[in-house]
Amino acid sequence: MLSKLLAHPAFESPTKRLAMKYFAVALVLFGAQLLFGLLAAIQFLWPDFLFNLLDFSINRMVHINAMVVWMLYAMIGSVYYLLPDETGHEAAGLKLGELVFWILTLAVAVVVLVYLFVQVGPGKDSTIWLITEGREYIEAPRWADIGIVAVVLVFYYNVLGAYLKAERKTGIMTVLVADLLALAGLYLAGMFYTDNISMDQYYWWWVIHLWVEATWEVFVGAIAAWALIKIVGAKRRIVEMWLWIEVLMLFGSGILGLGHHYFWIGTPEYWWEIGALFSSLEPVPLVAMFVHVLYDWGKEQGRTQALENRSAIRNAPAMAWVSINAFGNFLGAGIWGFFHTLPQVNIYTHGTQFTAAHGHLAFFGAYAAILIAMMYLAIQGAAGIRIMRMTALSKWSIALLVFGIMGMTVALTIMGYEQTLVERAELGGGWQAYFTAQNLPWYVQAQGWRLAMGVVTFIGFVLLFVDLLTIGNRQHEERQHEMEPAPAAA
Amino acid sequence: MIIQKCTDVSCDNIFAWLNQGPLTLTITLHLIILVPMVWIYLQEKRKLQHRPPEES
Amino acid sequence: MSQHDPSVWSSTSFWRRSAAWVTGFSAILLIFLTFDTMSQIQMGSDEDLKTGKVRRVPAPTVINHAIEYKMSRKRGHEVPVIGEEQPFFGKIWSPEDARALLHKGKVTVQAKNCMDCHTLLGNGAYYAPDLTKAWLDPAWQKGGLMQTLTRTHSTEEAMAKFLMDPPKYATHTRRMPNLGITRDEAVAIVAFLKHMSAIDTNGFPRNFSKPHQGEVTYAK
């Protein structure tokens, strides 16, 4: 099993062992996400590549679905991992949790196989139920939706059970339990059909926006708070106070910030104002989160330096990824989001590669980074390593992933600018305008750079993959070596 | 201009009515959300003042 | 001094209560807004079309009418203008038939996964043109490139013929694949596209297919 390879399974806790399984699948799906992204990027440059065999729509669908699913897997893994520490109890229905893991993984495999080999169906209701729902990000057919709801209910039962049994209810767990309920409940908004495309998209955004710009962000806040306690020994009182401030600001701006998706889908004009001004505040909590990470790091570093003359960081790769998360979230979700959130700008940028630029950096900075940090923390726990150091691979994977994603983001931003100016502002956004803009040198060159940077990202991922598989065992053995002469010294 | 007449398809609803030009709707909503926090603040302040100071 | 002037700003309980209030109230506000928006984006009735009552999302029978996209002085942007009765695929569709056709069209658009190449109302993937106002695009009108290529004499026939075998009528190296769309499905998709073009999108896309300075040519 891949989960065994991930680390030396030194856990006493069965809940943590279950967490490792989720991380293992997440990592595989992460790889699939990048591979299919590369295929789609190649098709932008050479449209004949895999034409009529594995068309762009299919590659793109697998690309974004694999991303959503790997992140959900890693999120479930993260919660299972911290659950015993935070509540002092194991998951309430562990056997059920185990069973559901296999059901979910089997279902994901079936859905992907159907995506790849059946691809599209006839224009009948049965296609929506069995093959694809054809709605970006939540293409999974209805049967899978129902399965996902069942799986999430079991997961939530496990978490809630442990939370209710806990003698001391920590702020982190309280936020997580409330947030996960909202996160799971929102999925239901994407599980119905209507002929009215405006209504369809209205509720579609409830899932997409209220996930990634509200409940997922709060989830990241809670996980980052926990990680800071683990990595640098941040004080719980301070971390949890910050967490509530973040919840206040994230939900305060994020829930009504939903309005920035309601500018042009047939909804009333008052959404211009609500969407513009609430979503303009969305970067504020992201700045706060960034400041918060640096503050706690600096504070604990100063303290341990003075008292024990050592670094405060107990897991260097995880700390690096938490920092990348803090800054990447602010840059990708905050800055790149604010770029095009005002309706005066958005009327020209809506539906251009601008959105893709924002999407790439935001998903990486806000979610991928913190989930990778959690994987390193979990491996540290699994291998029983007291202080986890960076390996050469950890460093190279960080460098290549960050460089690759930033490169793709910049390339996509250039495409977005070009589309905005030429296709939208100048030529009026029609069929001819679209193709004119797609064939201009700025656009084509940027597509080339995006593919090159995609390859860099993929190499970075391969290094990350190898590092995650080996770092646990390697540092575990090193520690055994260090400990052998210990009795003599004592 | 601070106030501008609603020009939307339908103007007979509370939100369109509040939306009299740029900012009016959002200023109202932000106020409704933020003002009660003053009350929460004062209440918490009173609670803290009546509690003996913690050692440490 | 500190004894009687404690700081509320560093009190967890203050932030917790504020977070609960702001989150709860925002959620309630969103629900109210949703009720109002839903009433405004409900599909209109055939009656509304006849009496000229403007709806954000018109009845399916809008497919029996000519549709234009014109600048509105009052609104400050372009709005769809629903005009005279105009047969769609050579006939006037009854409200029931139009509803059934729109349903088939929407289901097909989902079943063929249009949204993972195209954008609908600006949402989707960016590999192919936006379909929001595709029905009104000059390329599909009389004298437009696509009617010439498909050798048809109406927008709906051109679109339907194209959809059934897109690679045959490809105009660029980036082609739309053959998705096995039948004639019935193609007719339904065109109905869906025509209906979508009549939705009031607050002026998106702006200056649709109306270049400011006439045709601009760029070096390839």
Image: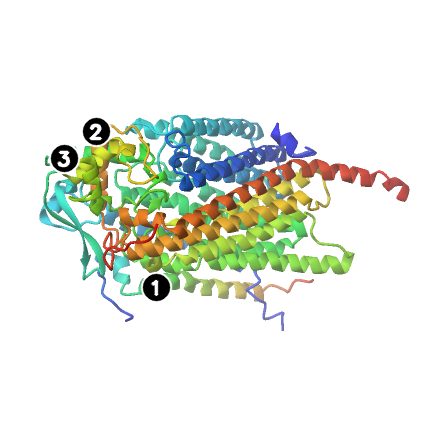
Outermost residue toward the front in this view: C219
| Residue in front for this viewpoint, A93 or C139 | C139
Answer with left or right where residue C186 lies relative to residue A464.
left
Callouts 2 and 3 in the same chain:
yes
Q: Are marks 1 and 2 on the same chain?
A: no
Of residue A276 and residue C10, the one placed in the foreground of this image is: A276
Question: In this figure, which residue is indicated by the disc labeled 3?
Answer: C89
The correct choice, above or below, for C4 with respect to A93 in the image is: below
Q: Amino acid at mark 1?
A: Thr
In what element is the residue under mark 1?
helix
Where is residue A207? Give x, y as percent.
40, 43
Residue type (three-letter) at the residue carrying disc 3: Phe
Residue indicated by mark 2: C184
Chain letter of the residue carrying label 2: C
Cα distance, mark 1 to mark 3? 50 Å
Q: Is residue A59 above or below residue A411?
A: above
Is disc 1 surrounded by few (<14), some (14 to 19) or many (20+) residues within 10 Å? few
Q: Residue furthest bottom?
A: C1
Please state which amino acid type lies under the numbered disc 2. Asp
Q: Which residue is mark 1?
A: B28
Q: Chain of mark 3?
A: C
- Residue A18 in the image: above or below residue C41: above
Q: Can residue C198 be seen at all in this image of the molecule?
A: no
Q: Are marks 1 and 3 on the same chain?
A: no
> Which element is circle 2 on?
helix
Q: Nearer the viewer, residue C25 or A300?
A: A300
